[in-house]
Amino acid sequence: MSSPWIIGGALLLLVWLPVRLYDLFSGRRLLLDLRDKARMGLRDVAAWDRRAQANPRRSDLVICLTTLPSRLPEIEATLKSLLYQSTAPARIRLHLPRLSRRERVGYRVPDWILALKSIEVVACEQDHGPATKFIPALQDLPADQRILVLDDDKLYPPDLVAHFDALSSEHPKTAMGSSGWCVPDDLRDRQVTAWGTLQGVPPGRRKATHVRAPEAVDILQGHSAFLIRPAFFDVDQFVASYADGPKEAFYNDDIWMSGHCKVPKVVFPARRFCFVSWRRVGLYDRTSLGRRDAGIKSQIETNTLLIRHLRDRWMNFLGPINS
């Protein structure tokens, strides 16, 4: 083999190997993510809204999310990814409290958001923290309504709605997500190595792109998207539980929601996972909806406190649950 072929092969390997390792450990698909980000950038958000409105492929899923006042002007990329879906949702609800408890200011909704026909801005009397993204929907919508819950700081693959539409039709009594985790027997959250996560060692976070078959989990993760229905909860009791529970529950909707969900929770295999807009990572980290002021417990300590508070809700107490 001539040296140019050898050099070319070596260069190709140098490019392919880091991409492959990134995909393996992140659960993402770098090249597909870059492709979709580039495509989304070809049109402004109003054009994607018109495309979504005209899309003949539709689902009755309702997408719900929330944000903070400081992050609202930066939500365009996430909304684009939701309008870019191959199957359009029935609508996208953006839940905004009248006053942000964390930032202590109200919301000024930009005109460009109000002009989007696919987006319903829902004014909420109470700020439930990160759980604001789904609690108003649990209270407002019919018991069997499928609610796809996600975060404001991620971009979502174009088949997300179609994926959850099909799975939730097949498994109507199952809460499902793109990632989740199981509570360890000692009821303690901890850091898990990347390899341990790939092997499914609790409390490693299991991603839909890593599982080969449906996996029951204790806790679904909102950042990657999960699907629930109001019928899965005693809604009034769940909302009231925040007043009676640890104050840390306000900042961690994943654990508190999962602990009050009455049906099995499952991560199903998927080809794609949520991805990020790298330009805004710093802003999103500083203003995270679940971020607490300095001096309050670390995330791992908070998670441990909450899973121990709800110790009788997890599979290691209840035993396996069939989905």
Image: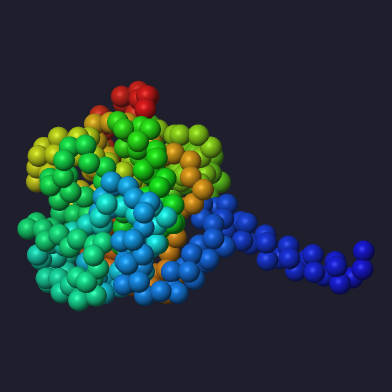
* In-image side of 183 versus 271 (left or right): left
Q: Is residue 271 above or below residue 116?
A: above
Q: Residue 121: percent from the left, percent from the top? A: 17, 63
Q: In this view, does 30 lie above or below 89?
A: below
Q: Residue 49: percent from the left, percent from the top? A: 31, 66
Q: Is residue 301 above or below residue 70?
A: above
* In-image side of 58 versus 68 (left or right): right
Residue closest to the far right? 1
Residue closest to the far left? 125
Q: Is residue 9 above or below residue 224?
A: below
> Which residue is drawn at the image coordinates 50% and 34% (left, top)?
213
User: Based on the displayed image, in which of its 4 quarters is residue 128 positioned?
Assistant: bottom left
Tally the numbered discs.
Answer: 0
Image coloring type: rainbow
Of residues 8 and 181, which is closer to you in this image?
A: 8
> Considering the image in quadrants, where does the N terminus appear?
bottom right
Q: Residue 95: percent from the left, percent from the top? A: 18, 59
- Is residue 3 at all visible to an observer of this figure? yes
- Is residue 241 at all visible to an observer of this figure? no
Of residues 168 and 33, which is closer to you in this image?
A: 168
> Which residue is drawn at the image coordinates 10% and 66% (left, top)?
99
User: Based on the displayed image, in which of its 4 quarters is residue 230 positioned?
Assistant: top left
> Considering the image in quadrants, where does the C terminus appear?
top left
Q: Residue 2: percent from the left, percent from the top? A: 92, 68
Of residues 264 and 287, which is closer to you in this image?
A: 264
> Which residue is drawn at the image coordinates 30% and 61% (left, top)?
53
> Which residue is drawn at the image coordinates 67% and 60% (left, top)?
17
* In-image side of 237 versus 322 (left or right): left
